[in-house]
Amino acid sequence: MSRPRAGVALLAHGGGPTPVLNASLAGVVEEARKHDEISGLYGAVHGLQGVLEEHFVDLFAQSEEMLNRIAATSSPRCRARFRRDPRM
């Protein structure tokens, strides 16, 4: 059996931020960090719009504290700000 190729992953949630989407975003980052074959994880800002406009955030660059804050956000608006990757 061949080993999976390493690569970068992209997360693009649809719809507005909700408690479920916030928690799943944090869970995806946590799980992706466990896999060596995932060399980077980027989130598309505003879902499909971010993909089309090539507007991404480096999710691996986010601190554990930030991800915990996002996961715990229960309001329909996420007030936590991602740290932008200057290369993007």
Image (cartoon, rainbow, N blue to C red):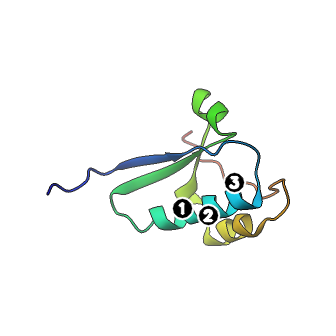
Mark 1 is surrounded, within 10 Å at the Cα level, by few (under 14), some (14 to 19) or many (20 or more) other residues, namely many
Q: Nearer the viewer, mark 3 or mark 1?
A: 1
Chain-order first, disc 3 or disc 2: 2
The disc placed on residue 82 is 3
The residue beneath circle 1 is 29
Give the CA distance from mark 3 to mark 1: 13 Å
Point out the image quarter for the N terminus.
bottom left
Query: Above or below — where is 9 with respect to 49?
Result: below
Residue 57: x and y in percent read 60, 47
Cα separation between marks 3 and 2: 12 Å
In the picture, measured across the screen, residue 15 lies left or right of residue 42, that is right
Q: Residues within 10 Å of mark 3 (few under 14, many from 20)?
A: some
In the displayed orientation, state which residue is furthest to the left: 1
Q: CA distance from mark 1 to mark 2?
A: 5 Å
Of residues 88 and 16, the one drawn nearer to the viewer in this rendering = 16
The residue that mark 2 highlights is: 26
For this view, does 72 lie left or right of residue 29? right
Q: Residues within 10 Å of mark 2 (few under 14, many from 20)?
A: many
- The image shows residue 69 at horizontal and vertical percentages of 73, 68
Circle 3 SS class: loop
Where residue 88 sits, quadrant-wise, is top right
Tell whether label 2 touches label 1 (CB within 8 Å): yes
Amino acid type of the residue tagged 2 in the rendering: Ala
Q: Secondary structure at mark 2?
A: helix
**Furthest residue toward top:** 52
Apparent side of residue 77 relative to residue 58 in the rendered image (left or right) = right
Q: Nearer the viewer, mark 3 or mark 2?
A: 2
Look at 62% across and 34% down and name the residue there.
48
Q: Nearer the viewer, residue 6 or 25?
A: 25
Location of residue 55 (image quadrant): top right
